[in-house]
């Protein structure tokens, strides 16, 4: 059994491929004391698109520094993302690594296997071993066309690794696939297991028992999404009953546990659902992080939503709600500033005559004593939060409710508010899905401001996320794109935040505006 540790490469998804030098030194020196054959230290990336750190581009000085830490029994590997590379680039991309890096691995989508073979054929003459990391094992069948391609490829690959990209495989299926490949392929086989449903170790053992001789692992499982097979678990398994000292590994684990507390990799609910349903974990994370739909709706949507999920009901356009335009509109989001400065916001709304739009129900009840026209946006499954108790709280304060134009996801508007419900087209930077692409609360709220003829939009409760996790990063990105799109498409509308925000907005103070509306010199 050969263990390949790819912590710096796979863990880089959390750190933007930046690691503190002292952490890397401790990591490499610790691995030198362990029965690990290969250390994969990052990517070689041909094109610089956005920021990527040291271990995404791997300067030769970095490669040489890590090589000096390793033991004689260990070799270096680097990975290329096949979809970003062309065969003609291989020499220039890898020439300076010759003699230091032993193996180049290619991450390849099965649909792009021909491209992967072309890259491998360009790399082999340069003197490197070439390994294939074939993605999406849970989607492969034993008679998949890619299997025939690998059989025809002969010895172009020195190692063929199967990657459980969604963490969706079970040991029985893994064993069956490896037994099938062992019969027809000459190259050594390996397994890269994601741990979405806690089966990375069991699946690795199933692969080994069925003929694999390589396994990938990372310290504490650090890696994209739910993470991977844990190096410490695989090393302990390999060395059981042998005279190996793992004390240095224990110290390294303490360092990585602190990093895990900061970055939070591991099998959280989105990754568990991704694994059990065989869905891309990024998509599941994106949907669940927004908290706009229940999990069954998300799963069915990602699998291909059916007609029973779609609502085609029409409501009057919000522009018909009032005979006169509303030049000033106050949009209240879900951030803490909408509560922290609640009294000042209420004073401003009451004295300025601004129409209030709640982008969601989150703070609507807190403003129920505000005697100005209030509108509540119902995106996604927001209408399902309108329990009888909430409706009773909002009865006097909310003038109307707003949904997106159809087709929209079915949300079951309560009968009590049907006569007070209007629709608007959301203001969105891009709607790739005509149903679920309309679920941004801010996009719907800004659509409502357009329907009201607003010339000035004051925002509060759009604070941003100072210490954002992956879910918050998704939400922040959506808000930022929507704000940028709105400002570009509707430059005549003044858009500003009246409470603190990390978004690139013009800022005004709610307290200065309140004093001004009350006639106090500012």
Image: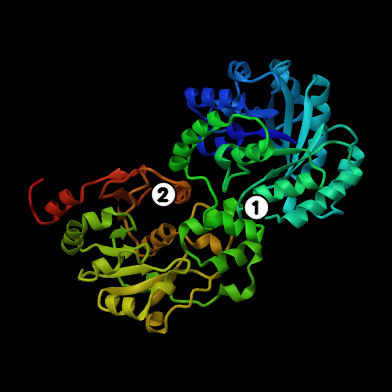
| Residue at the (45%, 49%) spot, across then down | 485
Where disc 2 sits, the SS reads helix
Picture quarter with the N terminus: top right
Which residue is most to the left?
A: 520
88 left or right of 217?
right
Visible in this render: residue 258? yes
Where disc 1 sits, the SS reads loop
| Residue at the (27%, 76%) spot, across then down | 393
Is 316 drawn above or below residue 23 in the view shown? below
Reading the image, the residue beneath label 2 is 483
| Residue 417 pos. (x, y %) | 38, 80
| Residue at the (21%, 59%) spot, across then down | 342
Is 156 drawn above or below residue 294 in the view shown? above
Query: Which is nearer the N-term, disc 1 or disc 2?
Result: 1
How far apart are the two marked residues, 1 and 2, measured between alpha carbons? 42 Å
Which residue is most to the bottom?
A: 415
| Residue 147 pos. (x, y %) | 86, 47
Disc 2: CA contacts within 10 A as few (<14), some (14-19) or many (>=20): many
Disc 1: CA contacts within 10 A as few (<14), some (14-19) or many (>=20): many
| Residue 112 pos. (x, y %) | 78, 43
Reading the image, the residue beneath label 1 is 199
Q: Nearer the viewer, mark 1 or mark 2?
A: 1
Which one is in front, 116 or 49?
116
Visible in this render: residue 110? no
The image quarter in which residue 184 lies: top right
441 left or right of 29?
left
């Amino acid at each position: 059994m050969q263990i390949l540790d790819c912590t710096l490469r796979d863990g880089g998804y959390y750190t933007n491929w930046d690691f503190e030098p002292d952490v890397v030194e401790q990591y490499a020196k610790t691995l030198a004391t362990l029965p690990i054959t290969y250390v994969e230290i990052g990517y070689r990336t041909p094109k610089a698109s956005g920021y990527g750190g040291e271990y995404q581009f791997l300067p030769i000085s970095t490669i040489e520094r890590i090589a000096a830490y390793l033991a004689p029994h260990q070799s270096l590997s680097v990975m290329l993302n096949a979809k970003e590379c062309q065969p003609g680039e291989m020499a220039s991309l890898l020439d300076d690594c010759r003699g230091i890096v032993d193996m180049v691995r290619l991450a390849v989508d099965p649909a792009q296997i021909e491209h992967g073979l072309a890259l491998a054929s360009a790399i082999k003459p340069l003197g490197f071993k070439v390994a294939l990391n074939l993605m999406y094992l849970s989607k492969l069948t034993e008679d998949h066309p890619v299997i025939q391609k690998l059989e025809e490829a002969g010895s172009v690959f020195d190692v063929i690794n199967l990657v459980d990209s969604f963490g969706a495989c079970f040991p029985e299926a893994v064993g069956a696939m490896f037994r099938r490949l062992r019969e027809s392929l000459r190259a050594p086989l390996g397994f890269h297991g994601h741990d979405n449903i806690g089966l990375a170790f069991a699946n690795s053992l199933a692969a080994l028992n069925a003929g694999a001789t390589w396994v990938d692992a990372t310290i504490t499982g650090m890696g994209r999404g739910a993470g991977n097979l844990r190096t410490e678990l695989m090393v302990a398994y390999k060395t059981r009953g042998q005279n190996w000292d793992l004390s240095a590994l224990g110290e390294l684990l303490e360092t990585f546990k602190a990093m895990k507390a900061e970055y939070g990799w591991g099998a959280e609910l989105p990754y568990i659902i991704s694994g059990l349903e065989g869905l891309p974990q990024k998509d599941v994370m994106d949907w669940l992080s927004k908290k706009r739909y229940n999990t069954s709706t998300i799963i069915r949507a990602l699998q291909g939503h059916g007609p029973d999920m779609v609502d085609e009901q029409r409501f009057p356009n919000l522009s018909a709600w009032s005979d006169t335009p509303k030049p000033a509109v106050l949009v209240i989001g879900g951030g803490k500033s909408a509560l922290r400065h609640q009294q000042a916001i209420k004073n401003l709304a009451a004295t300025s005559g601004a129409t209030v739009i709640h982008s969601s129900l989150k703070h609507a009840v807190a403003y129920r004593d505000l005697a100005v026209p209030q509108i509540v946006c119902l995106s996604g499954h927001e209408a399902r939060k309108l329990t009888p108790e909430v409706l009773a709280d909002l009865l006097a304060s909310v003038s109307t409710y707003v949904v997106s134009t159809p087709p929209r996801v079915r949300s079951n508007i309560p009968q009590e508010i049907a006569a007070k419900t209007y629709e608007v087209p959301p203001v969105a930077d891009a709607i790739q899905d005509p149903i679920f692409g309309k679920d941004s609360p801010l996009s719907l709220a800004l659509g409502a401001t357009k329907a009201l003829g607003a010339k000035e939009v004051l925002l509060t409760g759009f604070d941003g996320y100072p210490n954002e996790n992956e879910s918050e990063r998704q939400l922040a990105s959506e808000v930022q794109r929507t704000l940028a799109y709105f400002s570009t498409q509707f430059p005549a509308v003044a858009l500003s935040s009246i409470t603190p925000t990390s978004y690139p907005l013009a800022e005004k103070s709610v307290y200065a505006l309140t004093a001004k509306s009350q006639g106090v010199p500012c």
